[in-house]
Image: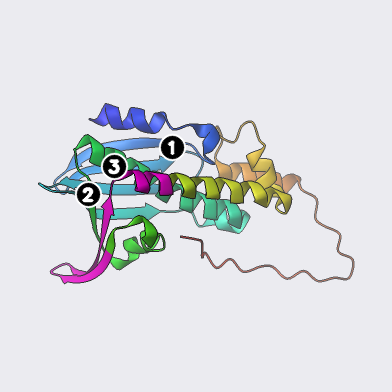
Amino acid sequence: MFSILKNYVASWQQQKLAFGYNLACSVEPAGLVLTLQQQQTAFSLSITLQPSPDALRLPTFSLTEESNLGDLCQPLYDAALIEIVLQGLDLIAFCAQRFHKDEVNFMLCPYEAEHLIAWEELFHSISAHTTTQGERQLLTLLITPVFFAMLADLKTQLHQKLWAQQKTDLFVRRYCQSADRMNAPVLSFLSLQKQQTPPAQNGNIISFPSVSSRKTAI
């Protein structure tokens, strides 16, 4: 099973993604733990799978991010965060099919659920519950052709929006058009680009730094 999952992630077409990915797998007392790692960033997504008679259960959907990326380039930070969540859903759907399940139930703490609730159109139902572990959000995902079509559309929209950012963001343009972007850490790449970019000449105009709110489309 591990080799099947790793080969599936390796098969993702990198020309259609902003970042590359690899997968780590382990068996823990809580279930099968999959850690999806974004190769160019320090972003990772840890998912715990628990097969049950009628559905695939997910008690964790834990995202680890590198906030410094947002200080260097907010559009790439947003793209990294959104893309790893979408690819995580892609991987979960693949796992559900391998386990012959048509339904996935996420039982998550509110913080973990935040990364998914914004895309409520993907889910069959979302509800809040009080459990012995505290407040939990139950998100039910049905693995249907409609879900796959919607997921593909979201990925296309993300790619188009990031590509459009090249018109106004020099660093997005340099990253997207770099032949080495899949082979180097994005933080190192952007730091080097900033060092090589001369400061803008604004005369007597004072430019105030924009405040990164860390709010994304997720």
Q: Any magenta on residue 143? A: yes
Q: How is the protein colored in the picture? A: rainbow
**Residue name at image x 40 percent, y 47 percent:** 44
Secondary structure under tag 3 reads strand
Q: Residues within 10 Å of mark 1 (few under 14, many from 20)?
A: many
Relative horizontal placement of residue 69, taking residue 109 as reference (left or right): right
Given the current orientation, which residue lies at the most extreme front position? 146
Q: Which residue is mark 2?
A: 103
Q: Which residue is mark 1?
A: 21
* Residue 41 position in % (x across, y down): 50, 45
The CA span between labels 2 and 1 is: 25 Å
Asked if the residue at tag 1 contacts the one at tag 2, i.e. Cβ–Cβ closer than 8 Å, the answer is no
Relative horizontal placement of residue 142, taking residue 99 as reference (left or right): right
Say which of marks 2 and 3 sits in front: 2
Name the kind of residue labelled 2 in the image. Answer: Glu
Say which of marks 2 and 1 sits in front: 2
Secondary structure under tag 1 reads strand
Name the kind of residue labelled 3 in the image. Answer: Leu
Q: Which residues are magenta?
A: 126-150
**Along the viewing direction, whichever of 146 and 177 lies nearer the viewer:** 146
Q: Main secondary structure of the magenta part?
A: strand
Q: Which circle marks residue 34 in the picture?
A: 3
Looking at the figure, which quarter contains the C terminus?
bottom left
The CA span between labels 1 and 3 is: 12 Å
Secondary structure under tag 2 reads strand
**Residue name at image x 51 percent, y 61 percent:** 216
Relative horizontal placement of residue 204, taking residue 53 as reference (left or right): right
* Residue 196 position in % (x across, y down): 75, 44
